[in-house]
Amino acid sequence: MNKIKSALLLTVIVSSTFLNSCDSNKTKENKLTTITVGVHSWPGGGITYIADKMGYFKENGINIQIKKIENFDTKRASLISGQIDVDVANTMDQLVIYAENDFPAQVIGVTDESDGGDGIAGKESINSLNDLKGKTVAFAEASPSDFFLRYLLSKNGISISDLKLKPVADPQIAGNAVIAGQVDAAVTYEPYLSQASKTKGMKLIASTKDYPTLIPGLLIANKTKIDKDTTVYRGFINAWYEGAAYYYAHKDESYKIIADGMGMKESDVRDILSEVDIQTKEQNKKLFDKNSSDNLYDLVKSIAVFWKENGFIKKSVDAEQLLNPAFINK
């Protein structure tokens, strides 16, 4: 073969390889599957924005769409109606309510654990949970705040009826109410706990610092969709934990990404995440391990029994049906 023919053949091969590569890239772009997630202003779910900005979702074949939904009932209704595909950073009590409504909800991952991020703040004259008797306490009904309050009261032998309850729409309202002096105490989360603690005449009464595994943030999806598009949800989880790894490697940049995405002050995001443990894939493996302490299966069972005793649900709950470890273990 002479030099001219060799050169022509090489040109054809290189051109063909280049064109095939371009076609392949176009195919990957065309095959992106849209997943819509519902988030609220809780930085524990902020990995959504990190994984999106760093391109991890697209690398895993996903076009992510993010919807801000602050109300728990609205968020739950959005997953049930199919308006969102993943409920980000919701909690165990909400998972049990999904089951009560016969919706096939499944946990496919844990976003974070509250390690002081949730709690009760109130007047400085309240020195113990027992001092809440006869006091007006604001809280978001049928929410993590409600569960935390009832759990602590039960642990300390105090009846919920001993308190003057003031149900509100969400923990932010409860936090603002106690800071404004409209109630004696409130069950809320950061940054309202810190703001209340710094307010004259106010103090922190109790927090999840003493119960760090009680309120994990969850990635909840529809089992029917999971079974239909297993590869897509596996890609979502892969991207999510790539984002979690990035968070731990680049915290300062991550705070800014989360703050920009959630429309929060960067200082608030930083303060909240100082009281929240973002969960990595390795930590998730332990949570989904039935032989480990504080595993999700035991927690679901405990919360279901507690929620049933308090009249929020009537049905029994099967933890095996509500937890899906497949994406964490593979």
Image: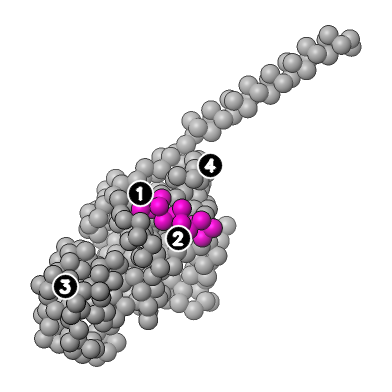
| Residue at horizontal 44 percent and vertical 50 percent from the top | 50
Q: How far apart are marks 4 and 2 (CA)?
A: 19 Å
Q: Position of residue 111 (x, y in %)?
A: 42, 61
Q: Name the residue under label 4.
A: 59
Mark 4 Cα-neighbour bin, 10 Å: few <14, some 14–19, many ≥20: some
**Which residue type carries mark 1?**
Asp
* Distance from Cα at disc 2 to Cα at disc 3: 33 Å
Query: Which residues fall within the magenta stretch?
Result: 247-261
How packed mark 1 is, by other alpha carbons closer than 10 Å (few <14, some 14-19, many 20 or more), is few
- Closer to the observer: label 3 or label 4? 3
Dot placed on the residue nearer the N-terminal end, 4 or 2: 4
Graded by Cα atoms within 10 Å as few (under 14), some (14 to 19) or many (20 or more), the crowding at tag 3 reads many
Q: Which residue is drawn at 25% across and 69% down?
A: 195
Q: Which of 280 and 262 is in front in this view?
A: 262
Q: Which colour scheme is used?
A: one colour
Q: Which residue in the structure is indicated by mark 1? A: 260
Tell me the residue that label 3 is attached to. Answer: 178
Q: What element carries label 1?
A: helix
Sequence-wise first label, 4 or 1: 4
**Residue 61 x/y as whole percent:** 50, 40
Query: Is 219 situated above or below 196?
Result: above
Q: Nearer the viewer, mark 2 or mark 3?
A: 3
Q: Most prominent secondary structure in the magenta stretch? A: helix
Crowding near pointer 2: few (<14 within 10 Å), some, many (20+)?
Answer: many
Which mark, by number, is residue 62? none
| Residue 13 visible in the displayed image | yes
Residue ID at (45%, 77%): 294
Give the residue type at disc 4: Glu
Residue under pointer 2: 109
Q: Kindly state the secondary structure of the residue where label 4 is placed.
A: helix
Q: How far apart are marks 3 and 1 (CA)?
A: 28 Å
Q: In which quarter of the image is the C terminus?
A: bottom right
